[in-house]
Amino acid sequence: MKKVAIVGAGISGLYLANELNKNTEIDYKIFEKKDYLNLNEGYGIQLSVNSINLLNKVGFKNISASDVYYPTKVNFFQAKNIKKICEIDLKQFNNVNDRYTTLKRSTLIKFLIGNIPEEKIQFKADIQNIEYNEKIKISWSNKNESFDYIVIADGVFSKLKSQISNNHLNPIFNGNIALRANLIQHEKDNISVYMGSNFHYVTYPVNQKLEYNFVAIIKKKLTTKEIENKNILNSETFIKSLKDFISQNSIINLESLANIKCFPVFVSTELPTLKYQNTYLSGDALFAFPPSFAQGASQSIETANGILENITNSNSIYKDKISKILLVNKRSKLNHFAFHLTNPIIILIRNIVLKFLSKNKKFLESYLGKIYRN
């Protein structure tokens, strides 16, 4: 029987474990350094049709409809006056059983972990070392165990990545702050993107219970001390400075925001090359995107599926997923650039182009269909 070690109980690791549950010829164990998983966090994620198709294969289609939302459009607005520019119909990328979906991240985590036997997860397991011989030996807390495969999915600041990759790559701060919150009162029933000078923000429902997600990406210079100190980033003074900036440059009632948290945006610059066989990176440990295409969670699931296919069928789908990551990264950067324009003339041109492209099915199939569906 093959044995698989999964490091990290995030979306990618838990999805892979759900798939491995169905294979009687593979055993696995999840190593999570935290004491427990937060199943109450209310921040949202978006899942495109590809990832929903994969999740449905492990039972996600049976989740209560009240716990998710199926947006039909993405609306684009000018932040300063809430003037609508255009909209994109998301239904064109759906199929009969799989639809573009928004939900709380904790809802997905709760579903995924609910299918995993308790004995398969080792909490408070901070991996100290990995040794490669005939087997892969993992050491933690004066314990060790050997496996045939290891999947490292422990986040953007993975400590283990340097041990197994030829090129030591640290994520870099991309000069932006993400302000994430729950939106208490809101009238929009789809995904709405509000574009301003050096910032944009996005709102969308996360379930059928009138709960909404809010995330703003704001260009902001930070000192090293500010980047490293979470207390500074989430202080009342710092959060107020960001809210004041948004208020001065847009029309939104920020009094409706709750549970506000801020964090610097770290992104990957290139893909790591791995030293050893039977070793995989997944999720943000593999590659962290700029948050302007809402593909982080979906790509975590798709990459984990590629790893599954590589382990069980020895095919090249994992390499295919790596190629797609590079494409998503390029489009995330392009979106970020377009959303943050400052020159009024360039903004006018952007809005005209968006109106045209949002109705061009050939462009939409190429730009979005290849990511969402293929």
Image: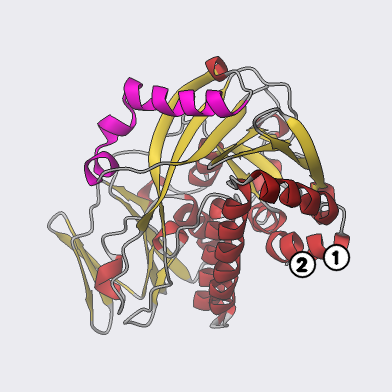
In terms of secondary structure, where does tag 1 sit? helix
Question: Crowding near pointer 1: few (<14 within 10 Å), some, many (20+)?
Answer: few
From the top left corner, tell me how far across and down residue 268 is, in percent: 42, 62
Judge by depth and name the residue closer to the eye, 316 or 256.
256
The answer, for residue 305, to whether it is visible in the render is no
User: Residue at (65%, 40%) from the top-left corner?
Assistant: 102
Which quadrant holds residue 273?
bottom left
From the top left corner, tell me how far across and down residue 124 is, in percent: 25, 46
From the top left corner, tell me how far across and down residue 144 is, in percent: 19, 64
From the top left corner, tell me how far across and down residue 242 is, in percent: 44, 29
Q: Give the labeled residue for mark 2.
A: 366
The stretch drawn in magenta includes residue 70: no
In terms of secondary structure, where does tag 2 sit? helix
Judge by depth and name the residue closer to the eye, 304 or 92.
92
Judge by depth and name the residue closer to the eye, 124 or 190.
190
User: Residue at (53%, 28%) from the top-left corner?
Assistant: 246
Q: Give the labeled residue for mark 1.
A: 362
* Amino acid beneath label 1: Lys
Q: Are marks 2 and 1 in contact (CB under 8 Å)?
A: yes
**Mark linked to residue 158:** none
Q: Is residue 186 above or below residue 100?
A: above
Q: Is residue 262 above or below residue 243?
A: below
Q: Is residue 268 above or below residue 123?
A: below
Which quadrant holds residue 194?
top right
Secondary structure of the magenta portion, mostly?
helix
User: Residue at (47%, 53%) from the top-left corner?
Assistant: 14
What segment is highlighted magenta in the picture? 224-250
The answer, for residue 162, to whether it is visible in the render is yes
**Could you give the CA–CA distance between mark 2 and mark 1, rounded to whole angstroms?**
6 Å
Left or right for 184, reference 134: right
* Amino acid beneath label 2: Ser
Left or right for 268, reference 60: left
